[in-house]
Image (cartoon, rainbow, N blue to C red):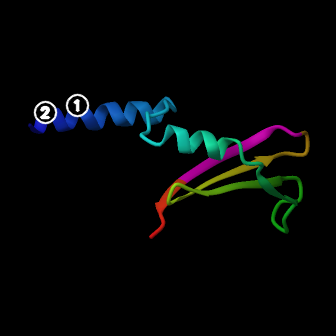
């Protein structure tokens, strides 16, 4: 049993490392969220580094008793080259 758990954890870590998409039960709900237009804010420069631009885009959808949120953060340099990118997805049940 412990060996099975270790193999499962290893496969999950490999999937995360390779950015594989783990199948979800809510694929239809995710398709609905993908159709939502994002609301984006852009911050050009900060006091510590005036050459970076940060763009944060958020999508929210309430459907089928669930609230889904997708937040994407992207930082680019003065030439438009992506320095970092992050994505956060959450789904919550609404009572």
Label 2: state its secondary structure: helix
Residue at (44, 38) in percent of width and height: 24
Q: Is residue 69 above or below residue 20?
A: below
Return the residue nearer the eye: 57 or 55: 57
The residue that mark 1 highlights is 7
Percent coordinates x, y for residue 56 in the rendering? 75, 56
In the rendered structure, find residue 37 and report the number of the disc placed on it: none
Identify the image quadrant of the C terminus: bottom left
Percent coordinates x, y for residue 57 in the rendering? 75, 53
Percent coordinates x, y for residue 27 in the rendering? 51, 38
Q: Is residue 55 visible?
A: no
Residue 88 colored in magenta in the image: yes
Q: Residues within 10 Å of mark 1 (few under 14, many from 20)?
A: few
Q: CA distance from mark 1 to mark 2?
A: 6 Å
Q: Which SS type dominates the magenta stretch?
A: strand
The residue that mark 2 highlights is 3
Residue at (58, 52) in percent of width and height: 88
Residue 49 colored in magenta in the image: no
Bounds of the magenta span? 80-89
Percent coordinates x, y for residue 46 in the rendering? 84, 65
- In-image side of 67 versus 72 (left or right): left
């Amino acid at each position: 049993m412990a060996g099975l758990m270790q193999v499962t954890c290893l496969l999950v870590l490999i999937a995360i490392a390779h950015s594989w998409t783990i199948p979800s039960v809510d694929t239809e709900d995710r398709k609905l969220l993908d159709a939502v237009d994002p609301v984006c804010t852009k911050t050009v420069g900060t006091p510590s580094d005036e050459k970076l631009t940060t763009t944060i885009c958020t999508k929210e959808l309430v459907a089928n008793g669930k609230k889904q949120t997708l937040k994407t953060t992207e930082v680019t340099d003065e030439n438009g080259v992506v320095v970092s990118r992050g994505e956060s997805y959450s789904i919550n049940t609404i009572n």
